[in-house]
Image (tube, rainbow, N blue to C red):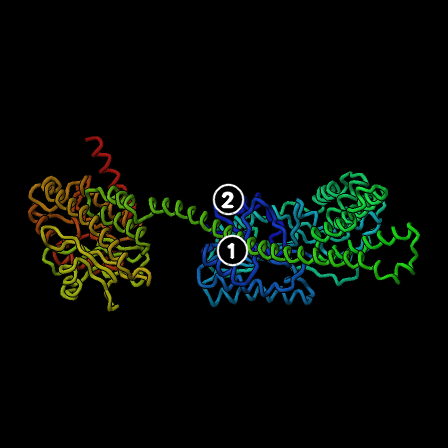
Amino acid sequence: MEILLTGFTAFLTQEWIETAFPDDHVLTTRAKGEAPPDTRIKTVTLEGRQLLDQIAETYQFDRVVYFSEYLLPHGNQEGELDRLRRVLQSCREREVELLYLSGPEAAFVPSSGKTLLANAAEELCFHYARTSKLQVKVFRLPYLYAVSASGADQFARLFEQMPAGTVQMEEQAAQPLLALCAEELADLVARVFDTWTPEPERFTLPDVFGSTQGQLGEVLQKLQPGLKVLYGTDTIQTCPAADNAVRRRYGWFQRYSILDDLPAIYHAWCARKTEKKSSIRKMVDKIRRSPLLLRLAEIAAAWLATELLVRITGTDAQFRMIDFRLMFVVLIGTVYGLNAGVLSAVLASVSLAAGYLRQGTTLMLLFYAPANWLAFIVYFVVGASCGYVQLRNTETARFVQEENDLLRKRLEFTRKLYQDTLEDKRLFRRQILGRRDSFGKIYAVTQQLDMLLPQEICRKTVQIMEDVLENHSLTIYRMEKNQGFARLTAASAGMTPEPAYSLEVDQWLDVLRAIEQEGLWVNRGFLPGRPMYAAGVRQNGSLVVLIGLHTASEEQMTLYYQNLFRILCGLVETALVRAFEYESVVRENWYLPGTCLLRPAVFAEQLATACTLQEDKMAHHLLLQVTGTFKNRAEINDRVRRSIRSTDAAGVGTNNAIYLLMNQTDEENLPLLTRRLGEKGLHVTAVPLDEQLRLISAAKQEASHA
């Protein structure tokens, strides 16, 4: 699945993602200027509003987790609603599972301004859930912390005050301390998505430890004995009592307390802050971190070197024609730009003026003699000219660099898309090979339909077509020999309204005519009382079975779906025709000689199939035992033949009793059926299900002994 993690993602690590989404493709986002949470995580910087829409359109996310800024106790919530709205807007056209993780502010009593804003964010999520395809769940969590580098940064405000001996908190000592370890949140997120339901819901995680800010201060005092902790005067806010809904629903509860984890976080922070460095090393690091200080240090070093050269070569005739000061101005202006060039000209002028003074020239003579100004003017002109040229080249290079960076980012984004496309290609290839309507699945369907009992094939057909077609409105009717009626053999469980047990063929001529001409009926006119799709099974040119699909969604009214239904019906036709031919060949061995009564083993097999259909809620049946005495077997056979339908069966049990298997008949029809059979000379009693199972078991045992 494609997963998007957005919002406050600073605490995320690769381990967290592997725990929450072990087998999914995960993409995280961060705001411009934020450091990536973990270099191993695939992260996209949101530099513009259109980028999020482009990412959502490209990746087609299945699940989105939004981490609210309210998960930080003193976070910056400015723009939170706008950022959340953009995420919701980008996903509203698809059935995306969105999990909004908010902080405890929305549940605080008494409420504050943050409480109203937090509730507004939650209601915004529910609004999109009602008006779009989004599926939303909101979790009100305690404030998040992490036993990692990001966790130390969250407590830096307190830790930095500790060396001074006093820590100031904004909350009162009795304020509840609500904190949740980020590592535990990963397990909760995984459980939520594993048992996802489409309805919008809101959950609040309870305060299981009952800790307070005062206890947090005591832990800080243990870490640094003698520490003084001062508490604020903010209003005490509490959360409602725990309802344990999360524990009952997801089997999850909080295990880690911040009071136990705080020492580890503090020691990690101290280890990072107390790296031993010499004073020279610290000064060098400070200069390196400041480009301005580094530039000034280099200019000063170059000026001192120039002064040294001037003093050393001042008495040498060979070097009197070389102006080291001018070289210094040209060098600094060319390397550092306009401002540095002017500064170097000032330093060179100071050096030249000092040289004149050492030679006995006074300041008044230096100022009032225009010939002495020429060198100073040259320094400033050369410094400004070289600095301007360097500045122009720098601006050109910076523009080209920015353009290259932009192109590099686009290339990187395109490369990621290409890699994701390759991953999707491999994934889709595996899915196609294992897809329910692939050739591999068609072969599996053929294997499953390899049976010899028509009733068992009908039962298996319903199961297979429900799975492949993703539709639960299938009916299978068997045509009577006189083609006057079609009797229901099997149907999907729970159909509303229930399918008719019998169909008059004369009223279905339009459906049958379309099947005869085109091989498939499609209800393009949405005629009431007609299936959306129907196909037939032919044997020797005659229609013997009618397969119908009574409802179909908009996505299922396609040519692809028609062809899939046609192919499956063709496979069913092959299996049923083979079963009918086998039945006609062995029919003489099934029945007692000269009767329509099935032998005990054969009758028990058909009864077992009927019981299985009834257990799967695909069909109904009644088993009736014939009572009374008859003159001879011919009389019994004549009365039974005139009393049952073509879809019913009559047979003999292992106890030599005669039974009638009335398919698609239930207890409500028993009085009418008993009266009708009595009029034809058959007195019957219903056989309960447990007795039916004993008949089947006895027949199997007798067959095994035989």
Residue 639, position as x, y percentages in the image:
10, 52
SS label for mark 1: strand
Instruction: Determine crowd level at label 1: few under 14, some 14-19, many 20+ residues with C-alpha closer than 10 A.
Output: many
Q: Observer-nearest residue: 96 or 551? A: 96
The correct choice, above or below, for 222 with respect to 175 in the image is above
Which label was assigned to residue 22?
Answer: 2
Q: Which residue is mark 1?
A: 64
Marks 1 and 2 sit apart, C-alpha to C-alpha, by 15 Å
SS label for mark 2: loop
Dot 1 and dot 2 residues touching (CB under 8 Å) = no
Q: Earlier in the sequence, mark 1 or mark 2?
A: 2
* 194 relative to 263 in the view: left or right: left
Q: Quadrant of residue 396?
A: bottom right
The correct choice, above or below, for 588 with respect to 558 in the image is above
Residue 156, position as x, y percentages in the image:
73, 50
* 565 relative to 586 in the view: left or right: right
Q: Quadrant of residue 664?
A: bottom left
Q: Amino acid at mark 1?
A: Val
Residue 160, position as x, y percentages in the image:
78, 49
Task: Name the residue at the front extreme.
Answer: 317
Q: Is residue 215 in sight in this rendering?
A: no
Q: Amino acid at mark 2?
A: Pro
